[in-house]
Amino acid sequence: MHFHIILNRQGGTLRTLDVDAFAAKSKATLEEAGHTVSTLTVDGKKIEEALTQAVEGPADVIMVGGGDGTVSAAAGKLMNTSKALAILPAGTMNLFARSLAIPLQLETAVNAFAGGEIRSVDLARANDRVFVHQFSVGLHAKLIELREKAEFRSRLGKIWASARAGLNALFRPPNLKVTLEMDDEMVEVATTGVGISNNPFGEGHLPYADMPDKGVLGVYVTRAWRKRDMALFALKMAMGQWKTNPHVDIYQSRKVTLKLKSKPKRFGCAIDGELCDLDGSTRIEILPGALKVLVAPE
């Protein structure tokens, strides 16, 4: 296959690497396996242009390295094309990469891709924005907003900033009133947060899907208000115990329309870990089999 490697030198853990040396080593590894390879290293502001050119180019596989925003942008560009996306796990939590069972060490991932196989997985869309992992409003969006105000220079620094922001958000949670219109029911609820995921989260681990091709959204409505309830909610979430979490209502639906009765500008939303403006009404839908990905051989 022909690989085109795009590395965002300002994205994720690549900021701390010799990106040119990593690109050269990755190229050599893939060529030794019989593939042809081209590489491109860009600054973050040029990633969209680089992805657009790659989609129009001759590559069979677009290998992308950067943070969550880079991966999300690449998935949007490659949606419903014949090209496959290979995700280098260079983000903070690498939740979509975990869902695809991609090795979390960069060089190990490249070695796996050298003998990898292509499969189709789902994407999701919130209005006109494609996402690979989650759309959220309320608690999670507030956590990200607080984290972005902190200073950090490394992956561990970002994790520590997230932990501090999480504590702040948990014990001073937002107060939302929303209506959720789903396939088979409508729910009107007061909540501290709503998360809608690209396929339901698995149990016993970080929040990512065990089945990235199930074809259904996971809908998570937080019902904790008191500090002790928020603490239990956070503990259960950290342990990956969703089904036994008494402070989360869980639904599944192929389409969801979220209508916010509170003022949207007070809250905003997060899509794949990035803050975005929130519309008064957001339509979220699953896109079954919309993305081809390269994964490690079974």
Image (cartoon, grey):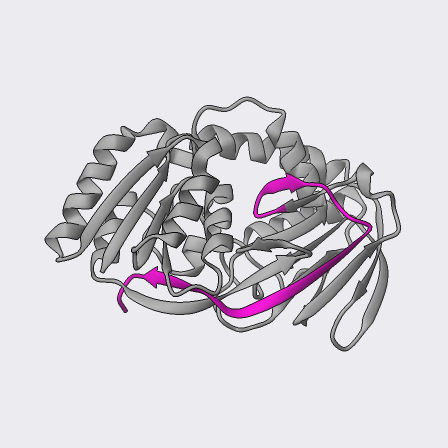
Q: Quadrant of residue 65?
A: top left
Q: Is residue 78 above or below residue 82?
A: above
- Quadrant housing the N terminus: bottom left
Magenta span of residues: 271-298
Where is residue 285? Give x, y as percent. 65, 65
Compare residues 182 and 129 and report the one nearer the observer: 129
- Quadrant housing the C terminus: bottom left
Q: Residue at x 69, y 69 (%)?
A: 255
Q: Can see residue 242?
A: yes
Compare residues 244 and 138 and report the one nearer the observer: 138
Where is residue 13? Give x, y as percent. 39, 34
* Residue 280: in magenta span: yes
Where is residue 112? Give x, y as percent. 24, 56
Q: Can see residue 247?
A: no
Q: Residue at x 35, y 56 (%)?
A: 102
User: Does residue 22 appear left or right of residue 188 in this picture?
Assistant: left
